[in-house]
Image (cartoon, rainbow, N blue to C red):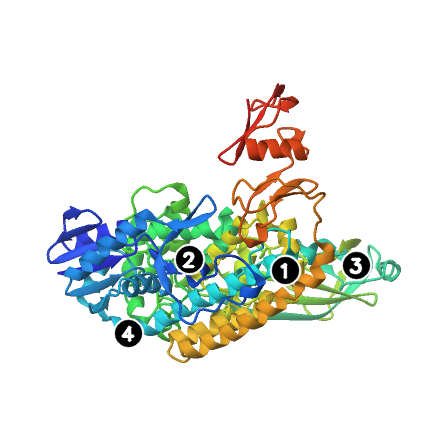
Amino acid sequence: MKLVIAEKPSVARDLARVMGAKEAKEGYIAGNGYAFTYAFGHLVQLCTPQSYGYSTWSIANLPIIPQEFKLEAKKIRKDGKQIDDAGALKQLNIIKSLIEQAEEIIVATDAGREGELIFRNIYYYLGAKVPFKRLWISSQTDKAIKEGFATLKEGTEYDSLYFSARSRSESDWLIGINATQAITLAAGNQGLLSLGRVQTPTLAMICSRYLENTAFKPQAFYKIQASFEKDAIAFKATSSKIDVKELAEETVAKITVGSEAKVLKVEAKETKEQPPLLFDLTSLQQDANKKYGYSADQTLNIAQSLYERKVITYPRTGSRYIGEDVFEKVPELFQHLSATAHESIAGIAGNLLDAKLNKRSVDDKKVTDHHALLVTDEKPSAMPMDQQNIYNMIAKRMVESFSEVCLKDITTVTLDANGVELIAKGTVIRQYGWRLSPEQMEAPDEDKNSDDQDNENVQLPKLSAEEILEVLAVDLSERFTKAKPIHTEASLLKAMETSGKEIEDEEMRQAMKDCGLGTPATRAATIETLFQREYIKRDKKKLIPTPKGLTLYNLVKDRSIAKVTLTGKWEQKLEEMRANKVSYDVFMKHIKDYTERITKELVQLRVSIAHEAPVPLQKNNIKCPKCASGKVQLYDKVAQCDLYARGCDFKIWRTLNGVTLDEKELKNLLEKGKTSTLKAVKNQEGKIVEGVLVFKDFKVSVV
């Protein structure tokens, strides 16, 4: 029997159907010589510090660096404690039983770094010795699945991918565990402060941009704009920026309505604007955030749903290119789109059937584990609106990417109006090409600073040097410089891709990918973690740091753990490991040395933090209801366990249901489970009543 291990039940069912296995069993599907089973994502994880004997948080224990990392079944948190996930244990036992019966294992987890780690952790945790092969496919269509099973790869071909994934996981553990404990213990009663290899530099980018924006003081500048007309075509010409108001007023006084301006020179330049590259996950997430306001995580989940519906290729790709072999099938996909896609996309796809296709997105050398996002030849059925939106974006980008270049004539006219130089610019589209129509002209990038941008005239009259024009109107306008905008998810993803470097050129950004923050598959999760930690919040599309996030940023902003470039270099080394250029041992030695250094740095912060830490208003003997070992300290607005920094996360507001509790009533509530009768309590309906506050299951109610 051949055992196929997929990443999730839905994929296992799909593979089983295609390969003719129909007998549903508990935890797997059997038939036709196969058994198809599955994980639920990560069934096995790296052991917690407790497994190495570190049961409490203490500076004396740091840094925690295991001699050898151990694996354990997935854990869940319940009542403040880590306990085994019963569902994970059950499924692991089913997989173990199937492995014992198998002659060969076929790895069918997602074809990428994380999918490889999910399988290998299960395999090594269960002590399996059965040989395994790899199913490596880029789409879930029946055709792709059958071809994949017919051309299975040797499992050892993906050892370097596994070591890269393992290194990422272990380095995240080392830096996350040690840095989090070090900063939390150093900060005392400021609560649990979480740091991470990728999340902290990402938070630093959000906070530094926010602080730069809010501290920005606009500077006034002035521009002169004169109006002209020739051959019934009106246009305007603008001066360069003038910083001093008095000088601007003196300058504009030189130009009067009815005076003459001479054309000094006319420069016409033809430019070719290449179509955009195909989408990878990060660029799809950026555009979906700009267009629909979808978060990176939402877009990933929607794309994953489309992949499982077989209508797009593998979404967690970091490549914006396809190989020559895939390019050969593109005309078939356009044939498919011309018959099934949205009307506007179908028409363009049809026009491309007999056209010479642009090959900018075709490069075998630039395809990584998976090629760029494409639609498949599977006919899409009715979809929810969010899925339809993402599908249409991918389909539209396909027809754009393989369309002709956009040809523009850009004309720059320089005029002299009584000694004042004025510039008029005009852009005329000679061939829309990939832009398809005037309506397709791109909106300005919302992350670009537009302080000094003037509208470019779409049309200018035919002009020549030495020609004299009459000034029809003149205007002096006061303008203000603008700060770089606060990050949105779109601009943050762009910054993460290039380790914060502002690179507009698409090809250059591609070259930076190996040293970006995180990977296309992990960036969404990193941003979501910052929300879960309550370090950032959304204000429409803007990402705003919370007071907690700013507090953490101010503590670590000058430390190496917040440096974007350092994390980018690690990502580059992990990519080199995947390509067999760097060894696991060399990389992990570097990470362990760094862990020791950053832990020491953060622990030493406690001296400078001490005088800023909040001081309890009074000592007391209220027993912590959660850990039973600590005492509840009273602060101005909250009460929390004094063992908070050692892992007990109990905290409660002092003001509950409109009443601020003194020490006596708080003691009654937490130790006896209820207060005495209070005269003015706000009940569940918001009415002021006489009642008793009751504390049960860590929730407070009124009776």
**Percent x, y for residue 438?**
51, 53
Q: Which residue is mark 4?
A: 157
Q: Which mark is residue 568?
A: none
Badge nearest the viewer, 4 or 2: 4
Give SS at disc 3: strand
Residue denoted by label 1: 186
Q: Earlier in the sequence, mark 2 or mark 3?
A: 3
264 to 441, vertically: above or below: below
Left or right: 177, with 557 as reference point: left
Q: CA distance from mark 4 to mark 3?
A: 61 Å
Q: Amino acid at mark 3?
A: Phe
Q: Earlier in the sequence, mark 4 or mark 2?
A: 4
- Graded by Cα atoms within 10 Å as few (under 14), some (14 to 19) or many (20 or more), the crowding at tag 1 reads many
Query: How far is mark 2 from mark 3, CA to CA?
Result: 40 Å
| In-front residue for pair 31/655 | 655
The amino acid type of the residue labelled 4 equals: Glu
Q: Which residue is mark 2?
A: 397
- In this rendering, is residue 480 above or below 669? below
C-alpha gap between disc 4 and disc 2: 33 Å
Dots 3 and 1: beta carbons under 8 Å? no
Q: Are marks 2 and 3 in contact (CB under 8 Å)?
A: no
Q: Are marks 1 and 2 in contact (CB under 8 Å)?
A: no
Q: Which label's residue is closer to the chain start, 3 or 1?
A: 1
CA neighbours of label 4 inside 10 A, class few (<14), some (14 to 19), many (20+): few
The mark closer to the camera, 1 or 4, is: 1
SS type, badge 2: helix
Q: Earlier in the sequence, mark 1 or mark 2?
A: 1
Q: Nearer the viewer, residue 159 or 383?
A: 159
Looking at the rendered structure, the number of numbered marks drawn on it comes to 4
